[in-house]
Amino acid sequence: MSQRGNRERAHRKTEEAVGGFRAQVTKRVGQFREDWHTSLLFRTTVSIIMGGAVIVAFFGAVIAGQLRGAVFEQNVNLAIEQFYSEASIAQERFNTYSSPTIGEAQQVADQIISSLYDPANGLMGATLVRSPEQDTQNQIWENATATATQVRALVTPELRELVNEGEQIAWQSVEIPREDGAAAGILLGTKLKIPTSGYYELYVAYSLEKSEELLSTTFRVLIVAVLGLIVLIFLISWIVLRLLLRPIREASLSAKQLAEGEFESRMPVRGRDELAQLAQSFNQMASSLEDQFNRMERMSKVQTNFVSSVSHELRSPVTTIRMAGQLIYDKREELPPALRRSAELQHSQLLNLDTMLADLLEISRYDAGGMSLATEHADIAQIVTEVVDMAQPLAADNEVEVSVAIIGDTAAEVEPRRVQRIVRNLVVNALEHAEGNPVAVEVCGNDTAVAVRVIDHGVGLSPDQAAHVFDRFWRADASRVRKSGGTGLGLTIAKEDALLHGGTLAAIGELGLGSCFLLTLPKVVGEPYQPPLELELPTVENTPSDPAVASAASTEGEAALAAASAADTADSPSAGEPDE
């Protein structure tokens, strides 16, 4: 059991080591990919190094092969010349005896074999082998020394066949056995004629170990030189690329600063080369942008101050005129029919004028950037219900049924006045464009946000119209007559109110099917949230089949809506000045 437990522990350690190694490899590969995709310096340097290494390796292999071949060929030629000289000397020594005895021939042969063993000069030994198919009886004994036996073992039938084909020197590459392994060498052979004994084959082994050592040393030096060259290429590439990429990084940093509104950001200009021209062009662009931004900022301030001043100055006379018009309107039943109609028209237009001034003041406060929230805990579903009740007379005039669906906890920290204004704009807009079809209002809350979705099935919006529906003074159909008035600023202000709460207001639609507006507000301003509802196109399926119609308000529709819109601005702090 103990051995089994040890094996299991060893197996677990091995698996942990392998897992750790894989994790490290995965981490390194991921880091390499990240650097490859995010750093031009890293990508270019690695590409240069890899390309240079491949090129150097290719040409290094070619040069090494050529060098090895040239050295080998030179060694073979030198060995052949030396062997030719030794074979000639051996033949001359045999020829000094016209009719040698067997003993004399044997003695000369032994001396020749002994003289061809000189390891210091690359001679690894020799042997004499009697040629086949001879009928002479006076044959000498083949040398039986260790070196002769070793050389004789290297002789192949193919080499003997080449030697016996004619009076030529033949050779082949061999591996000469040694105590510590084998050494590269060549084996040469030729025929000798021994008087009274016939033809014998002389074979001599030459070692190429010294040449191999010289080549190995040369290749090691070349490898070290190549590695040094690669390191030098890396350093030069890295330095040059840093110098080249520095203006690009400076341009990127300056562009980010420009995007963040730091228009005084400039690139340093060094020299007069192309990079310096790039820096000059960038600085000219930045200067131009700064001038245009300052000019537009001055124009915006002038425009904002003008609108705010005019709206504020018109409030008093318009209020006086509206009060006088209200008195006339209240006494309209005592007037002749023609004057009664004029009083009603006057009253309606005065309400629209008052609403427009209120909207202009609100927009000017947003432009001035002085808006602030006075949040309180409120139930958005209750606010929506109140708005629908207020809009019921307009719904009745347009013969539109309004349904309200409430799901989940809809309480949040909001400014009720602004939320009411947003919802009123969405509901009134839906009633105006519903074309007599039902309007569905959904209020849904989750743990982090509350959403209000208003869907109508009227004329609808095209994608281009949906993109501009929150623009100032924009209308999808300028010729369309609105029953509730309108200034073209309602949805713009609604969008700003939603953003002030840290929420969103979006629209989508399709011509002939209707439109959908979605308001999403966080339950706590500034906190992250998850939208409870999605923005979706109106379809036949989401058309309410049995709408729950809110109770009707007791006041007149047009007057109540216009008065509520004007009251929003009248109740806001500092009607003529931005909020503190």
Image (spheres, grey):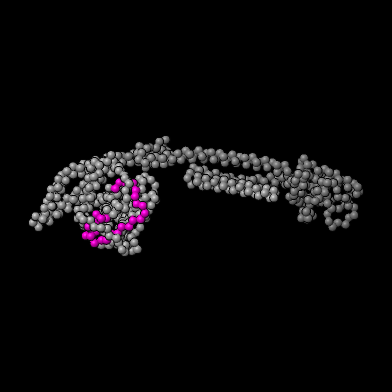
Left or right of residue 86: residue 19: left
Residue drawn 23% across the image and 42% down it: 575
Left or right of residue 448: residue 17: right
The stretch in magenta equals 388-416
Question: Is residue 317 visible from the viewing direction of this image?
Answer: yes
Foreground: 44 or 487? 487
Residue drawn 80% across the image and 48% down it: 151
Question: Is residue 539 visible from the viewing direction of this image?
Answer: no
Residue 104 image offset from top left, x and y in percent: 90, 46
Left or right of residue 9: residue 34: left
Q: Say which quarter of the image contains residue 131.
A: bottom right
**Against 509, is 49 above or below?**
above
Residue 452 image offset from top left, x and y in percent: 33, 53
Instruction: Verify whether residue 374 appears in magenta.
Output: no
Foreground: 573 or 88? 573
Foreground: 147 or 101? 147
Residue drawn 17% across the image and 52% down it: 349
How many labels were placed on the picture? 0
Foreground: 372 or 370? 372
Instruction: Verify whether residue 406 appears in magenta.
Output: yes
Residue 228 image offset from top left, x and y in percent: 59, 39
Residue drawn 8% across the image and 56% down it: 336
